[in-house]
């Protein structure tokens, strides 16, 4: 089990209540991945850090063969309990290893998950292993915050963040720039009791990600400002990057 996954192992039953983005955001994610899959070779899709299936299940419901990897058995149990969850081929493991069997048209990491890999070595290994799992012309897609946006949000102090079920959640981000790390601490108020959730991240600039991709034999095909496919610009705080393995 990779370090720092306490939230996924201990709070999987509350994960969807507390951390699910608005439905429109998930719909946009599924739509963009489906569109990208059309431009990729024929073949299955693989989600790294599939979690409770927020993205994988609707993507599979559109007719795509979707596989997943996650380190947290408890998250996979939540996925399995949902409609269609039993049909997904899911393996338990560290997604930086990408040791799921098969060759894929598209491998993706969604929901701010890539930076949960705790070191540059783990992130680079993930690029390399994903690249080896791709069919020629296949795509590796990930979403991530820009470091500048993380600095700004850390400077903004403790803020309320929306939860799917309306419970009060407060988030503090703390940056440790020397190690390119940040920590998100959440306090969620449930039935009058605050619960604490901590998630640790190792961040990287788009340029560093592009270099990791190049080292893994992938090149940047497109970069969007979000999952709706808006252009990536100087004011973007976020990016969705699409890397391609040459055909
Ligand atoms: C923030 S959740 C996102 C889940 C899903 N991708 C989504 O967008 O709803 C991140 C998931 O990645 C998993 N995860 C984080 N690091 C991992 C690793 N190194 N190997 C496998 N799973 C990991 C966690 O267990 C968790 O289920």
Image (cartoon, rainbow, N blue to C red):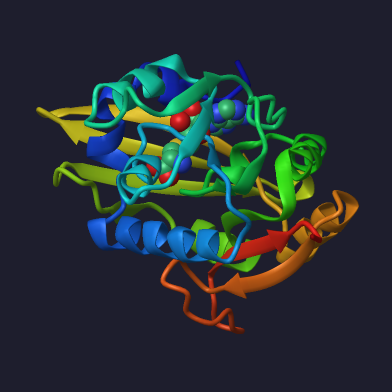
Q: Residue at x 22, y 31 (%)?
A: 83
Residue 93 as seen in the image, left or right of residue 99: left
Name the quadrant containing residue 18. Answer: top left
Name the quadrant containing residue 92. Answer: top right
Residue 138 as seen in the image, left or right of residue 194: right
Q: Residue at x 47, y 79 (%)?
A: 230
Q: Residue at x 70, y 61 (%)?
A: 243
Residue 189 as seen in the image, left or right of residue 121: left
Q: In the displayed structure, would residue 64 be above or below residue 193?
A: below
Q: Residue at x 52, y 35 (%)?
A: 49
Q: In the displayed structure, would residue 238 be above or below residue 169?
A: below
Name the quadrant containing residue 39. Answer: bottom right
Position of residue 220 measured from the top left corner of the image (x, y, whole percent): 74, 67
Count of numbered labels shown in the rendering: 0
Q: In the displayed structure, would residue 238 be above or below residue 99?
A: below
Q: In the displayed structure, would residue 174 be above or below residue 6?
A: below
Residue 81 as seen in the image, left or right of residue 31: left
Of 112 and 59, nearer the camera is 59
Position of residue 69 measured from the top left corner of the image (x, y, whole percent): 54, 28
Position of residue 210 measured from the top left corner of the image (x, y, whole percent): 79, 62
Quadrant in which the C terminus is drawn: bottom right
Residue at the far right: name it: 215
Position of residue 234 measured from the top left corner of the image (x, y, whole percent): 61, 84
Is there any visible trace of residue 209 in the rendered image?
yes
């Amino acid at each position: 089990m990779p370090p720092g996954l306490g939230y996924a192992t201990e709070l999987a039953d509350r994960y969807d209540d507390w951390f699910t983005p608005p439905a429109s955001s998930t719909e946009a994610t599924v739509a963009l991945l489906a569109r990208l899959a059309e431009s990729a070779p024929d073949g299955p899709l693989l989600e790294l850090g599939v979690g409770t299936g927020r993205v994988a299940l609707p993507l599979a419901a559109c007719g795509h063969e979707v596989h997943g990897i996650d380190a947290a058995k408890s998250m996979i149990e939540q996925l399995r309990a949902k409609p269609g969850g039993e049909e997904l081929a899911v393996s338990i493991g560290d997604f930086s290893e990408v040791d799921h069997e098969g060759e894929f048209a598209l491998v993706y990491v969604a929901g701010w998950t890539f930076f949960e890999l705790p070191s540059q070595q783990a992130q680079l290994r993930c690029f390399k292993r994903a690249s080896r799992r791709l069919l020629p012309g296949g795509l590796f897609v990930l979403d991530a915050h820009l470091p500048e946006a993380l600095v700004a949000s850390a400077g903004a102090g403790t803020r309320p963040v929306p939860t799917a079920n309306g419970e009060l959640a407060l988030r503090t981000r703390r940056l440790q720039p020397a190690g390119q790390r940040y920590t998100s601490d959440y306090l969620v108020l449930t039935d009058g009791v605050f619960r604490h959730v901590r998630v640790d991240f190792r961040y990287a600039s788009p340029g560093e990600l592009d270099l990791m991709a190049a080292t893994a034999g992938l090149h940047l095909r497109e970069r969007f400002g979000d999952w709706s496919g808006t252009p990536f610009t100087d004011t973007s705080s976020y990016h969705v990057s699409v890397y391609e393995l040459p055909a």
